[in-house]
Image (tube, rainbow, N blue to C red):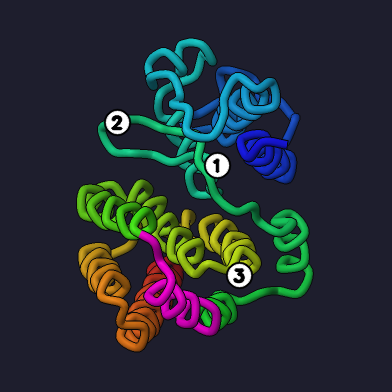
Amino acid sequence: MRRADNDVMLKTNQFKSMNPSTTKKPAEKRTQQDPQLSMQVVNHIRRLVENGKLKPGDKLPPERELAQKLKISRASLRSGIGYLAATGVLKVRHGVGAFIADGPPAFAITSFNLIGALHGFQSWQMFETRLILECQLVALAAERSKQEHQMALAEEVAELFAALDRPTDFLVHDMNFHRILAQASGNPVLAAIMETLTVAFYKERSKTIEHAKDMREAAAMHRLIFKAVCARDAEKARTLMERHLSASMEAQSAEKQKRRTSSSR
């Protein structure tokens, strides 16, 4: 089987794990970013992949054309594309468009989310897991990354700075940066585990990203991590990643505390 066929199969499996709702709402009650409208985008692109009409590297039709075809707003279209980008199915290039991406599949994300709901996974536990995993992954990336990985990381750093006034887009590129680092580790098992965590983290963080106050600082830290990886400085990359994740955990904890305080007034 050709590599392209394998990649399409991986993307198809990812789509099948998304488990969209089939319940329909009256059209007049739908908001511009209704989750069910966004899921129409997921289903449409899934069918194109399954039918072989879209393959890794292919570009999606322009936003206006796709929105008209699906008869949804561009806001709902972007929401669906953002979801697919965060889950690794699409690669979004600012000012260029969205493409079917290459990358590792996530391990049973639906099962992971169910277990998390049953056992009450906490935010700090997710961060602790990321600290253990990503500090080692970034060190491996510093030792093993190829030029293609470094170029992809540079692109995501640029996109982070370009999206400082667009929190949802910023989150997608943030997740992509960490995803590429995992791939650059050269260990596909670790990359697949990281992919599962990335998708789960995106789903949680997307609920609060609009309240983020530290995006410029986060973008700057990503740039420092990128430079350490390119310099093959594994220890510095590890230290910077630990600092970045710890700062992110503190910032998000402060956001939640502020929202609790505001809602209790």
Distance between the alpha carbons at the discs numbered 1 and 3? 18 Å
Q: In this orientation, which residue lies closer to the viewer: 161 or 252?
A: 161
Between marks 2 and 1, how big is the CA–CA gap?
17 Å
To which residue does mark 3 refer?
190
Which mark, residue 89?
1
Foreground of the two, 90 or 37:
90
Lower sequence index among marks 1 and 3: 1
Distance of mark 3 from mark 2, alpha carbons? 30 Å
Front tag of 1 and 3: 3
Q: Could you tell me what secondary structure mostly forms the magenta stretch?
A: helix
The residues colored magenta run: 131-146
Query: Circle 2 sits on which residue?
Result: 96
Q: Which amino acid does label 3 sit on?
A: Leu
Give the mark, 3 or 2, whose residue is nearer the N terminus: 2
User: Can you say whether 164 is above or below 194 in the image?
Assistant: above
- Looking at the picture, how far across and down is residue 77, in whole percent? 46, 28
Tell me residue 261's x, y (percent). Answer: 40, 74
Depth check: give the residue in front, 235 or 176.
235
Q: Which of 140 and 79 is in front in this view?
A: 140
